[in-house]
Image: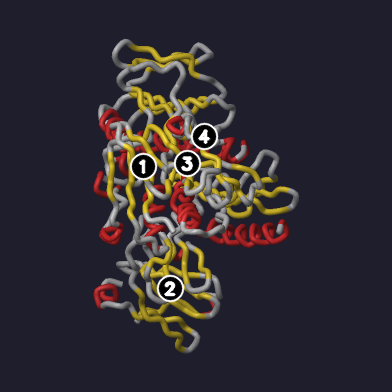
Amino acid sequence: MISSVTVVGASLAGLSTVRALRSQGYDGRVVVVGAERHPPYDRPPLSKAFLAGTADEADLALLDRDDDGLDVQWRLGVPATGLDAAARAVTLADGSVVRADAVVLATGARPRELPAAHALAGVHVLRTLDDAIRLRDDLGRGGRLVVVGGGFIGAEVASTARARGLAVTVVEAMPTPLAGPLGAEMGEVCGALHADHGVRLLTGVGVAGLVGTDRVQAVDLLDGTRLPADVVVVGIGALPNVEWLADSGLDVAGGVSTDAGCATAAPGVVAVGDCARPYDVHARRPVRTEHWTHALQQPVTAAATLLGGSEPYTQLPYFWSEQYGLQVQLAGSRAEGDHVTVVHGSVEERSLVATYERDGRLVAVLGIGATGPFSRWRRTLRTAAAAGMALAG
Amino acid sequence: MIAVCPLQDLPPGTAVRLDTHVPIAVFNADGDLYAIDDTCTHQDASLADGYVEDCSVECPLHASTFDLRTGRPSGPPARTAVRTHGVTVRDGVVWVQPCDVATEATA
């Protein structure tokens, strides 16, 4: 039985693992290491209510009175720099070493940077609270915002900035925004929301570079267009924070490799959340997932594994986004070639539920501005997934 | 007491929202009726839009679950309970008895 645990990462996945360990009866020592100086906070509002100014730092706090009994030793503001997996010893940036019977890897992900970007004022990525504070203040200057990347972060920032009165242009390198997560057909629908709200969307064109000396002045596109900009936000995906594990002996290519129960190849070492690449029982292959609900729910499995269990994580993927006041919700695993059918509402109404089918099986459900109907279809999807798993044995 | 709807309009697996001052959601969970506060205690979402399984409802947005009998959160991220309210069926009509006078007075 383990009597000490080091959790590396103090965001939702790390905190959820601590909560799960305690609720599953673990009463030993817990040390949580966090690279950021902030206690655990909720990231989804950073691109929405926090950026809009309707939520403040206190509203983001993940810790509440129910956590008083968690009995955690916090090591915040000190990134981990290395792991000796066999000794379960974590080295921190200040040179100290934290040893324990078990280690939870929950270091999350970081924004991918624009290759052409250099250190210009007014150019932002959005991942952390500090990122969001800087961007919120910069958006307060008003003017012209160029968003590089038409994904969820880009769309949410565009939506929030537009509501704050900025002139917004979104640049998407692919022909359709959100084609990866939603498919081209439904990505097109989300893309149309920008125009509905007076935001310009440019697709199929990449960024050549940023213009400016101290502060950004424009974004140059590969087709020769120059977009004047007072503020630029780069939202072009995220990379798992696994470089610090390079000498650990663990397989960290594309995320920390684990089995379906979150266990790495090293005994007593599990990985959760955005930094992990677990075997997915639904997709039947390793999948790294960046969803908030994943970071919330998967740690229950990881904690059980550390305490001697061997159950796989079986929850279906689910994420939501909020754009221009509409909830965009996807449950399940969509893939290229899935057959898409609008089963409720319509594109014109900007309120719909669409199903994704593969080989005649329901594999994913999308809702746009249709929360209630989406819930009912999500139930149908869960039933179908359970049946699919039973068939697969 | 607030009249909700005819029982036949609330079949098993469905829910209806009452737009009282503090909105109330009334659920039919496999034949048993429950009423709780409609707004999720995590972030603004209508639990009447969530889905019901056994004796719990899952928030449609962020997956919090609440026990319909007690109002207590049975799954994260919600940490705070919703209030429960009385439900009765009289002559084929569903009625809700709000748990405090304030809710009823402003209905």
Amino acid type at mark 4? Gly
Badge number at residue A86: 3
**Residue labelled with disc 2:** B68
Q: Quadrant of residue A124?
A: top left
Question: Disc 1 or 3, which lies upstream in sequence?
Answer: 1
Same chain for the residues under marks 2 and 3 in the image:
no
Amino acid type at mark 3? Ala
Specify whether B100 is left or right of A300: left
Specify the subunit that label 2 lies on: B
Residue A191 in sight: no
Badge number at residue A386: none
| Distance CA(mark 3)–CA(mark 4) | 9 Å
Same chain for the residues under marks 1 and 3 in the image:
yes
For the residues carrying marks 1 and 2, which lies nearer the camera in this image? 2
- The single residue placed furthest to the bottom in the displayed view is B91
Q: Quadrant of residue A158?
A: top left
Q: Residue at x 44, y 24 (%)?
A: A113
Q: Residue at x 30, y 42 (%)?
A: A50
Camera-side residue: A160 or A35? A35
Mark 1 and 3 residues: CB-CB less than 8 Å, in contact? no
Badge number at residue A48: 1
Mark 3 and 4 residues: CB-CB less than 8 Å, in contact? yes
Question: Disc 1 or 4, which lies upstream in sequence?
Answer: 1
The correct choice, above or below, for B80 with respect to A350 in the image is below
Mark 1 surroundings: few (<14), some (14-19) or many (≥20) residues within 10 A: many
**Residue labelled with disc 4:** A249
